[in-house]
Amino acid sequence: MYDILKIIFVIIGSIIGAGFISGQEIYTFFLKYGEIGFVCVFFMGILLGAVIYKICLIMMNEKTMNYDKFLNIIFKSKFSKMKKFLHCLVNIFLLMSFFIMCAAFCAYFKQEYNISVYLSGIILSIICYIVFIKNINTIIKINSILMPIIIILIFFLITKLDINQVNINSSNNILIAILNCILYVSYNIIILIPILLKLKGYMKSKKNIFLSSLICSIIVVFMALIIMCTISQINRINFIEIPLLYITDTYGLSYKYIYSLVLIIAIVTSAISAGYGFLENTIKNKRNYKKLAFLICIISIFVSNLGFSNLVNVLYPLFGVLGFLQIFFILKY
């Protein structure tokens, strides 16, 4: 059971980033489609669980050790050009995701506490570098501590949720809503695969894999529903950068601080997952690995003035299309 919990927390730590916790992802991919968006959340959970389960089975059966070998397995030789192209774009997405999460971290402390973006950027880059040069066990330990905190605090929002204030519009864009749901799973799989490949040692049976996939799906679905119901109480939500922070601020100062803690943890774990995935996909030599890890951490300090809402609204759906190719071939394998 302990191995299952480790897998669950690492997977959730990779999925639950600044976009999810801010409410931006939930609004963009689900809430804006009204009632059908709620149905799509459940479909998302089923699809996410199925893809995670299938990836882990492929790893067990084929003894896959890295991302390149994994792509060779699912794309076969006749799709070698597509594989190389996808591999390159996936690495770009992971690197940009890392930078944007770092920028979101710095922007938060600048906005809330007027701390220099460069000071907070240096602090986060040091944290990330220390984690990067360690092995996957360090990421597992971090997520095992931080993810239960996030899950508990998000579920804590239920205590302030007024069902009568939940405002869900009707929608006729069923096909578009379903497509966005698939795109949501697609780009999350891009970040997940490199991490999952490093968890092979914890996947000792099909039962473990099934339970991990099932529990992850249930937790993500319920967290998404809680956030949807919470931010649906906001008027003109599309004009608000961080919807969940806006609504928790109205609950009182203590709720704002609680949510701020959740947001910070989510940004850090998401940055670590994206950066680690990029490094694992790009460099195999340990010496060059440390050099590249140091380089991207330094660069992250100087891109701290970037925002993350554009990534959620534009870049994620774009790369979700690429992730869809992976999902198709994974389920087809």
Image: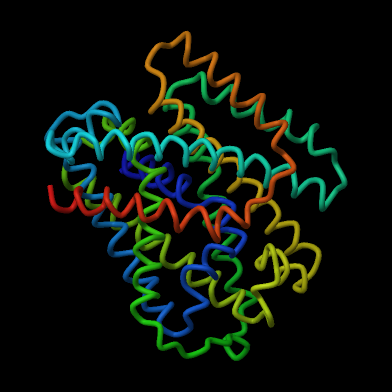
Residue found farthest to the right: 114
Q: In this view, does 249 lie to the left or right of 331?
A: right
Q: 119 or 310: which is nearer to us?
A: 310
Q: Where is residue 186 in the image (x, y as percent from the top left)?
A: 36, 54
Instruction: Return the x and y of residue 52 as percentages of the image width and height.
Output: 28, 49
Most extreme residue toward the top is: 287
| Residue 240 or residue 209, whichever sits in front | 240
Residue at left 21%, top 29%? 64
Lateral position of residue 181 relative to residue 307, left or right = left
Q: Quadrant of the N terminus?
A: top left
Residue 133 versus residue 100 in the image, above or below: above
- In percent of width and height, residue 9 lies at 43, 45
- Residue 318 sits in which quadrant? bottom left
Nearest the viewer among 181 and 252 is 181
Q: Where 253 sits versus 98, above or below?
A: below
Q: Residue furthest front?
A: 81
Q: How many labels does the image show?
A: 0
Q: Identify the residue at horizontal 60%, vertical 91% (top origin).
A: 164
Q: Residue at x 73, y 64 (%)?
A: 255
> How has the structure been colored for display?
rainbow
Q: Where is residue 292 in the image (x, y as percent from the top left)?
A: 53, 19
- Is residue 218 rendered to the left or right of residue 249? left
Q: In this view, does 119 lie to the left or right of 83?
A: right
Residue at the spot 63% in from the left edge and 88% down from the top edge = 165
